[in-house]
Amino acid sequence: MISNKAKKEINSWVEKYPEGRQSSAVMEALKIVQSENGNSLTTELIQEVADYLDMPGIAAQEVATFYENYNHSPMAKNVIRVCHNISCMLNGSDELITHLESKTGVKTGEVTQDGNICVKKVECLGACVGAPMLQIDDKYYEHLTLEKVDAIIDGLKEGK
Amino acid sequence: MFEIEIDGKLVNAEAGEKLIEVTDRVGISVPRFCYHEKLSVAANCRMCLVDVEGAPKPQPACSTPVSEGMKVSTQNEKAKSAQKSVMEFLLINHPLDCPICDQGGECELQDVAMSYGSNVSRFNEGKRVIADSNIGALIHTDMTRCIHCTRCVRFGTEIAGIMEMGGTGRGESLKIEPFLNEGIQSELSGNMIDVCPVGALTSKPFRYELRSWQMNSTESIARHDLVGSNINVQTYKGKVKRIVARSNDSVNETWISDRDRFSYEGLSHSNRLLKPQVKFDGTWKEVSWEVALDFCVKGLLRSAGESNSMNSLGVLASKTATLEEYYLLQKLVSELGCENIDYRLGVKDTKNTINLESNVKLSDLEKIDHALIVGSYTRLEQPMINHRLRKAALRGGTVDVINSMQFDFNLALNNENIIIPCEIANLLASTLKVVLESTNQDVPEELNKLTITKSATKIAKKLLSSDASVIVLGEHVINNDNAKNISNLVAMLAKNTNSSTLNLSKTGNSIAADIAGFFPGKDGLDVNSMLGKDMNAYIMFDVYPEYDFHNSSTAIKALSDKNSFIVSMNSFYNNNVADYSDVMLPISSYYETSGTHVNIEGEFQTFAASVKAPQESKPAWKVIKVLADLLDISGFNYSDSSNVLEEAKHNIKQGHRAEESINITDTNSVEVIWQPSPYSIDALLRHSDSLQETKIGQINKATMNSSTAKHLNLGDKDDYLGVPVVISSLVANNCVFINANKSTPSEEQA
């Protein structure tokens, strides 16, 4: 269920678009609903968002599956987004990802047993200049090496 | 208009045209997958890349507008190499499973790959695999074969009006799928099979049956609605195997409804009546045609009695016969001196029903700027007409509705009036009063007392302010207590607002029945009077009493009267028919006989038989002809059905004309609208298993609001007139809207 608080927030986005174009607010609406639901979306929630914005369910689903920032299963406390597009790939993102997988003990997209960390492969984050790079919350970590990654993971494990 | 140069040839082009439209028109072939002339341009498959002089890169022909002096090459090195590269990319993830793919042999990808593909793949990596989704009984999915052209997605949003398929994920994980695995709901869904350029969406009932080149194809006409969509019937060894759309822009464009596409399945149903049968001492015996027809003739002559008068013969037919069948049967009966003849079996009172002409062309329907729909859920009842109205709405036209239930229209409604059936006439009368007053005309006495409501003013203003408006009158009104008034009011409203009219209440091939004069003569009895009397004999043409009659139990009771001699011609076996008949003659069903369908424009669409009638069943027009010969009636020397058509055309009868009179009666009880669900309107559809499995096929509900339910003392687990109750606020108060795939009510309760 979408809470009244979330609806209010969604409405403030709907108002920014011309009348009848309420579906333009779908990205923000999904984000709001996701954060309310412990950082993940369910099929029911996506349908509710679609109904609320008077758009077909599949159209909301298209958006929710296109962007990496929507999660479709219960999400970890810390999501590490590793870019694997061309610049990062050429600079060793594959190696980084393998390293991260062995370090955390789970595959990309999966959540560690303690619910702390999830590594996600994402598309270009626009920081090619600092490749290879990853993102945690709003922070970019660039020019990564295996050592730097180790330090980041250890930091997350200690709850920093 | 200006000239452009394509492959060295000068061709004419219109400003605003896309390159591909020009190449298609002049017959230059450009490969394509995502482009479809009836859908929006996506330009995502890139297959149609061509070289445009001056452009640094090859341009997609489907999205490149023409400009004066343009020089295009579709064949030079640059274009060819671009097309080949795109082909290679498209084949990367496409499985090499043509031998087990239903699309093989009629596959756009296969064809284009033959000309543009390489014979060796450079792709050694693993191919992408996508799990299939179950999208219902009509369409089979093999999504691994999908090349993401998005034609099915665009078809859903642009033509069907409900977005059901979508592209989820991105990049390599992009999938075309429905959101919830609930099955496709659209009444036009089968067209996705036609638009899919690969084997991702194929016909489920046709799965693994045959290759396209093994079948014969005959042009035919679909007869389930008032449009008469043009189709190709594909047959193999005397069986109809598949039906696909045939383009005809003035009728159905390139689309057909699921009803027209999949009903053929019923033809091979085990319930077909295949041998003539005669009832001896209460038991049915299979006999030869000679014996059966002889029995008919003797029985009919005996029923005439000593006076040799056929006054006590009744002739009834369903709405699905061909023009030729109506004409011949009518001719036979009137030669016998009988005028008791009728096809309006579902009408409660034939003197109080709709008589309205249709005077708008289907292709003009999409150009109207306003439509007023009265008593119809056009989307499910007349899908192709609804499609034209939807196009009009998308172009900026407005649609007002007067219905007794809120329906899930796939077009934007301007003003929806949900009122109880007995108020429809009043609302229309009040609208007419507004129209007459605002055009400074005399208001007839009958209208003087009426108060003008706000909704009437709104409806009237819209009709008056529109240049090209149409009033659509639907099936829900045929048994309205004020049906005749409503019909007359619509005619008068149309006249005074300069609107056209569209009468959707005469479904199937009813228009042909009218033209053939298949209605009671001057002193003849109509269907209800026949049933009310003890007729000595009946000839029943493809009648299935529990579905066709307005009140099935009264009709069955009347027909079961032992004294009547009943000849039934049917294409399907039916228990009730077997109970009351004395002879059952097996006749052809759809696609098994030649004939003519007359559509809502009055267009005669003649078709040939696609297959022979199975086993001993015969084309009905031949049966009637032989019956006439045996009865010693002259004038039945037809060698084929085209002679019948010629004669029928020279004897076109006029149906009853609309009158300008209004006399509205008030009713004050709960009113029932009985509308068969879309896939149970005729015998063939009722025997098409796949259609019956779909969501639309499953519709069987008596919808009423909670206060009506309370009044009738019903809950949502009860049945009303044998149909499960659904309580919903969508229905007008004091009204029950029944959409049933079962028989008509056994008892008149309303």
Image: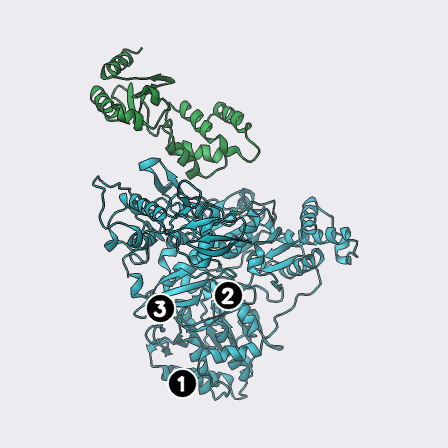
* Label 3 secondary element: loop
- Dot 2: few (<14), some (14–19), or many (≥20) neighbours within 10 Å? some
Q: Which residue is mark 2?
A: B554
Q: State which mark lies toward you, 3 or 1.
A: 3
Q: Secondary structure at mark 1?
A: helix
Residue B678 is left or right of residue B392, and the answer is left
How many residues crowd around disc 3 within 10 Å: few (fewer than 14), some, or many (20 or more)?
many
- Mark 1: amino acid: Asp
Which residue does the numbered mark 1 point to in the structure image?
B294
Few, some or many C-alpha atoms within 10 Å of disc 1 (few <14, some 14-19, many ≥20)? Answer: some
* Spatial separation of the CA atoms under disc 3 and disc 1: 23 Å
- In the picture, measured across the screen, residue B417 lies left or right of residue A101, that is right
In the rendered image, residue B487, in percent from the top left (x then y), is placed at 64, 60
Which numbered tag is attached to residue B272? 3
Residue A56 percent across, percent down from the top left = 46, 39
Q: Earlier in the sequence, mark 2 or mark 1?
A: 1
Is residue B723 among the parts visible in the rendering? no
Tint of chain A: green
Colour for chain B in the figure: cyan
* Nearer-the-camera pick, A124 or A139: A124
**Residue closest to the eye, B470 or B175:** B175
Which quadrant of the view contains residue B532? bottom right
Subunit of label 2 = B
Type of residue at label 3?
Answer: Arg
Examine the rendered structure and indicate whether residue B389 appears above or below residue B710: below
In what quadrant of the picture does the N terminus of chain B appear? bottom right
Q: Tag 2: residue type?
A: Thr
